[in-house]
């Protein structure tokens, strides 16, 4: 797997800043209660944000982009998932049925 940057420089700087801020905050919390497991998990997540900012690579962004490509390819092969919303609006307006009244079962 080749890792290439998939986030911008501004996004990377925001991730680095937020990661260091969260890491500093959680480190001060860990001083008072060092055996809390939730603090260790948050510190790990903050370190991951710092690493994402330094590498300019986010695996969640990559996964989302791959999902969008898969969905686009899948929808182009099977057109039965592509809806034309104009048809629904015309039926709601009564354009196809000729009658302007909608059906009310009560």
Image (cartoon, rainbow, N blue to C red):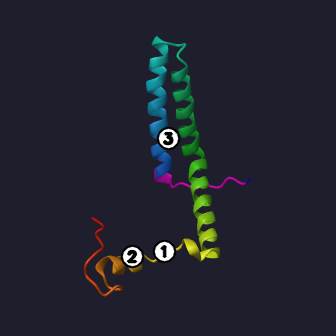
Q: Give the image quarter of residue 99.
A: bottom left
Q: State the residue at coordinates (41%, 75%).
A: 85
Question: Residue 89 appears at what percent x and percent y?
Answer: 35, 77
Q: Which residue is mark 3?
A: 16
Secondary structure type for disc 1: loop
Foreground: disc 3 or disc 2: 2
The reply to whether the magenta stretch includes residue 90 is no
Looking at the picture, does residue 47 appear above or below residue 69?
above
How much space separates mark 1 and mark 3, taking CA atoms?
A: 41 Å
**Sooner in the amino-acid sequence: mark 3 or mark 2:** 3
Q: Mark 1 or mark 2, which has the lower sequence index?
A: 1
Q: What segment is highlighted magenta in the picture?
A: 2-10
Disc 3 crowd rating (10 Å Cα; few below 14, some 14-19, many 20+) is: many
Q: Which mark is residue 99?
A: none
Q: Of helix, strand and loop, which one carries label 2?
A: helix
The residue where tag 1 is placed is 83
User: Is residue 9 on the magenta stretch?
Assistant: yes
- Identify the residue under disc 2: 88
C-alpha separation, residue under disc 1 versus residue under disc 2: 9 Å
Dot 1 and dot 2 residues touching (CB under 8 Å): yes
> Which residue sits at x=55%, y=71%?
81
Question: Callout 1 environment at 10 Å: few (<14), some (14 to 19), or many (20+)?
Answer: few
């Amino acid at each position: 797997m080749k890792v290439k940057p998939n986030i911008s420089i501004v996004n990377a700087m925001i991730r680095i800043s937020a990661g260091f801020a969260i890491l500093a905050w959680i480190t001060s919390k860990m001083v008072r209660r060092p055996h809390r497991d939730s603090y260790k998990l948050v510190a790990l997540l903050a370190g991951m944000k710092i690493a994402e900012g330094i590498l300019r690579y986010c695996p969640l962004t990559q996964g989302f982009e791959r999902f969008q490509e898969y969905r686009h390819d899948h929808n182009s092969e099977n057109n039965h998932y592509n809806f034309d919303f104009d048809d629904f609006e015309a039926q709601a307006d009564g354009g196809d049925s000729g009658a302007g009244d909608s059906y009310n079962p009560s």
